[in-house]
Image (cartoon, grey):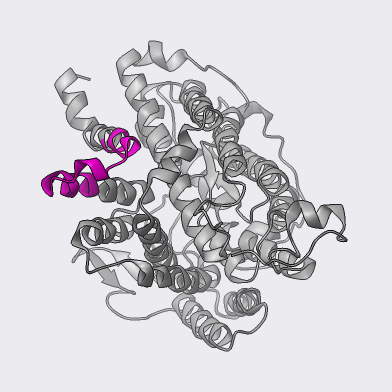
Amino acid sequence: MASTTKTDNLPGWDRWFHMTERGSNLGTEIRGGVVTFVTMAYIVVLNPLIIGTAKDVNGNLPGGGQDFGVAISLVAAATALIAGLLTIFMGAYGRFPIAIAAGLGLNGFLAFGLAPQMSWAQAFGLVIIEGVIVLILVLTGFRTAVFRAVPDALKYSIGAGIGLFIALIGLVDAGIVRGGVPLITFGVYGELAGWPIFTFCFGLILLIVLVALRTRGGILIGLLVTTVLAVILESTQKIGPMKDDTGAVANPTGWGLNVPHVPNQFFGFVNPSPLFKLDIFGAFNAIGAVAAGLAVFSLLLSDFFDTIGTVTGLAHEAELIGADGDVEHLNAILTVDSVAAIAGGMGGTSSNTAYIESASGIADGARTGIASLVTGGLFLLAMFVAPLTKIVPYEAAAPALVIVGFLMMTQIRKIPFDDYSIAIPSFLTIILMPFTYSITNGIGAGLVSYVVIKVAQRKSKDVPGMLWIIAAAFLIYFAVHPLKELLGL
């Protein structure tokens, strides 16, 4: 709950952001904003490797050319630009410590699912349509009504599930958890081999100690110290990247994404305007109205519930839930997120959405939109200052995600596990988020199973009307591919 400190004599900007009211201060907010940026800055590097390397049906890369280097640079600049502007918008209007950036999963769907069937301009057009629909749902109050219709125990399970999910992301990014035979493996061939994994382990132990001792700014201290260690190790051991230029794993004990080093060139700028090409309705001609409609529906449901899940988990972690169970400034937060989807389509970076990595800044004390102003400003600087995104490797940022996962997982204690009608849906919500790498899948499984159990118990009257609509939508969402086969698409 927010603090009850009197705010009558505070500066207007303090009252607007509720900084003193929420028990925070300017230094803590700035630090939290920096932590969030450092934890999620990888998206400026990773999104271009997904969007910027995929060719559309005409054989063109985003921006219209066929030069991978140019396309990657364009998408990187646009990713930083849109993330910066929308995160600042979130901070100023939503007044919540949530950062916005190109959504992982959504960008993969665009690159590998839609672009091969249409032009990039047409694929981004579908993202714009999806964003407009979500914005309409927010302005009409539908999205807020959905948020309120979800049972409290499922909201807690969403937070706990996101905790497991974000911890898994950290472990995968660090190379501790890898895919293979069996399905998932430990480290490199079952061992903690290589200096990058050592860097992660060092950072995790350091953060465990700092957080356990409740050291102020502990997460930021851990990130910075571990990054310095990574730079020193790379400069002395010449470790190199894990993957070669083709994307194949050539060095299993190499760095996962960024190779930490001080770059030769500190400043540079790429104009991303070639990406700003619109063909909003062209996809309906390219693949047909039904197929395009199903694509928009898939984008819509994923974006819609990813954000609801993220906001729910972060609000509980930050203790910014009102007495009525609502998130403070919820409608403004959801409005910004909807605009972010539209902006991502217009900017050629895929749908932008709220990031669960924002939990790292919250864990370090961020409680207001001021932290998002800082994060957004750093994203804009990333368009000009190369080290902001390229010096921190996965292995240095991943320990923060594991610790944040622990902090969010503590919400599981609020779930009544002795009531199977809510405990089983909560369990499915929690486990399917990390196991399917999707917040939306977890929420969908939880809500559908909740409705099914209530029907089986002959307690259908306990299910709000809104949940019936949501459950039906998720059934369609899960059955998209069988529907396509049935319709011959």
Write the residue at 36% across / 46% down.
440
> Could you say which is closer to the camera, residue 450 or residue 362?
450
- Could you tell me if residue 53 is visible in this image? no
The secondary structure that dominates the magenta segment is: helix
Relative to residue 262, is residue 428 drawn left or right? left
**Quarter-of-image position of residue 333:** top right
| Residue 261: image location, x then y, percent | 64, 68
State whether residue 342 is above or below residue 188: above
**Quarter-of-image position of residue 429:** bottom left
State whether residue 134 is above or below residue 85: above
| Residue 303: image location, x then y, percent | 44, 39
> Could you say which is closer to the camera, residue 71 or residue 389?
389
> Could you say which is closer to the camera, residue 470 or residue 201?
470
- Could you tell me if residue 261 is visible in this image? yes
Write the residue at 31% across / 60% down.
430
Relative to residue 12, is residue 337 drawn left or right? left
**Quarter-of-image position of residue 54:** top left
| Residue 351: image location, x then y, percent | 51, 36
Magenta run includes residue 455: yes
Q: Which segment did they paint magenta? A: 448-471
Write the residue at 62% across / 47% down.
329
The quarter of the image holding the N terminus is bottom right
Magenta run includes residue 22: no
